[in-house]
Image: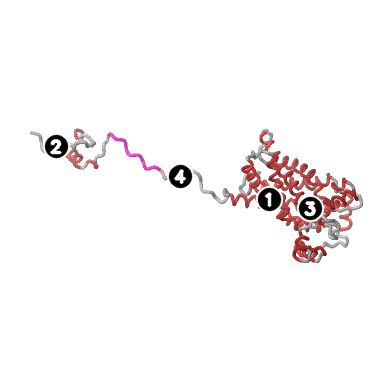
């Protein structure tokens, strides 16, 4: 007769066989199977780690708002610093463009006259207005270029490598920037123009805005509204200025972007300062060729306090009639390239450097 101290495990139990357990442990295992997990089954796997996000939440530096703000800041700072460096060449170019009676005074003569009559400080006349212009005009045109490039690429289904797309993006951002900042451009031209009595036309740039507004409010053509007349005076020359900026930005940033892409695809250079310098040299040449005639018309209209010209077309007609077709390139192309070319190189290099500093990918 079998001992009552041994019992068979319940049917279906997967406990360890009692043959390898002591009698007391076998009875305990049969009555409480959860105290004796099956040795033949694999151990329970460790709990899975907490799920990780497939994409990190956007940080301030990766968000679209930060990228746009940083691009605007890089554009404004780079162009304002460039304007400080190139103001001497810019003011000589403006003085050359204002020369009348078919004269084509060269750089040495104009610069020598300024140095003799006004002193070395005259080469930085209007530098405050020039920096203010870049902080508005170039901030917008450089800052919005990539925004419009992405927009047009999606709307038109065009590859971002297309030069036509880059030119169209430059035309749009340049026109918007120039239309927005036209009053600062006008003040810059007037502060850089000839000073017969040796004194600036306005006590400072900000007083100049008020004076130009009052000048338009008192003009006979104000149409009875002093406010409208004042605003029109601040925006005198806005159409040639806008056209010039559209042509300039498309040929400047568009060609810079295109040259960079071509050089990198060909494996000639990698992203970096040598590539930025080389591409900006080419961009400066293209921009100078394309924008010089518009620049001359813009300067003449903005300095026209006596309202000699009715509009941009009237200005072009009288300029060609009285001074010849080459007057559209007054100031000499070499001087235009010296100024705009150097400004393009400095501003684009600084633009790229500030982008890197702010954590934004290169253009």
Q: Is there CB contact under 8 Å for labels 1 and 4? A: no
Q: Is there CB contact under 8 Å for labels 2 and 1? A: no
Left or right: residue 20 versus residue 357 is left
Between circles 1 and 3, the one closer to the viewer is 1
Residue at 76% from the left image edge and 49% from the top image edge: 243
> For the residues marked 4 and 2, what is the alpha-carbon distance in whole angstroms?
53 Å
> For the residues marked 4 and 3, what is the alpha-carbon distance in whole angstroms?
55 Å
Dot 3 or dot 2, earlier in sequence? 2
Magenta residue check for 42 = yes
Q: Secondary structure at mark 4?
A: loop
> For the residues marked 3 and 2, what is the alpha-carbon distance in whole angstroms?
107 Å
Residue sitting farthest toward the left: 1
Magenta residue check for 272 = no
Which residue is disc 2 drawn over?
6
Quarter of the image where the C terminus is located: top right
* Secondary structure predominantly adopted by residues drawn in magenta: loop
């Amino acid at each position: 007769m079998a001992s009552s101290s041994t019992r068979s495990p319940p049917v279906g139990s997967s406990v360890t066989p009692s043959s390898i357990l002591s009698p007391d442990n076998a009875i305990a295992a049969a009555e409480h199977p959860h105290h004796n997990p099956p040795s033949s089954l694999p151990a329970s796997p460790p709990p899975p780690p907490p799920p990780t996000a497939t994409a990190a939440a956007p940080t301030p530096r990766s968000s679209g708002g930060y990228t746009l703000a940083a691009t605007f800041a890089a554009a404004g700072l780079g162009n304002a610093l460039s304007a400080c460096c190139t103001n001497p060449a810019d003011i000589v170019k403006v003085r050359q463009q204002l020369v009348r009676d078919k004269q084509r005074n060269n750089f040495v003569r104009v610069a020598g006259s300024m140095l003799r009559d006004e002193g070395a400080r005259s080469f930085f006349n209007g530098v405050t207005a020039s920096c203010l212009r870049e902080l508005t005009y170039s901030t917008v045109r450089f800052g919005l270029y990539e925004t419009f490039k992405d927009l047009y690429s999606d709307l038109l289904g065009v590859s971002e490598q297309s030069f036509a797309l880059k030119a169209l993006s430059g035309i749009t951002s340049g026109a918007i920037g120039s239309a927005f900042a036209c009053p600062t451009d006008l003040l810059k031209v007037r502060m850089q123009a000839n000073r017969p009595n040796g004194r600036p036309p306005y006590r400072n740039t900000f007083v100049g805005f008020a004076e130009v507004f009052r000048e338009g409010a008192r003009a006979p053509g104000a149409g009875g509204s002093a406010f409208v007349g004042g605003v029109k005076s601040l925006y005198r020359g806005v159409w040639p200025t806008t056209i010039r900026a559209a042509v300039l930005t498309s040929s400047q940033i568009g060609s810079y972007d295109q040259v960079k892409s071509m050089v990198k695809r060909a494996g000639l250079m990698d992203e970096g300062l040598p590539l930025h310098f080389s591409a900006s040299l080419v961009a400066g040449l293209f921009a100078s060729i394309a924008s010089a005639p518009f620049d001359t018309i813009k300067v003449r209209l903005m300095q026209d306090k006596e309202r000699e010209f009715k509009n941009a077309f009237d200005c072009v007609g009288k300029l060609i009639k009285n001074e010849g077709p080459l007057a559209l390139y007054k100031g000499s192309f070499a001087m235009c390239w010296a100024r705009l070319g150097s400004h393009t190189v400095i501003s684009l290099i600084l633009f790229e450097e500030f982008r890197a500093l702010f954590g934004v990918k290169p253009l």
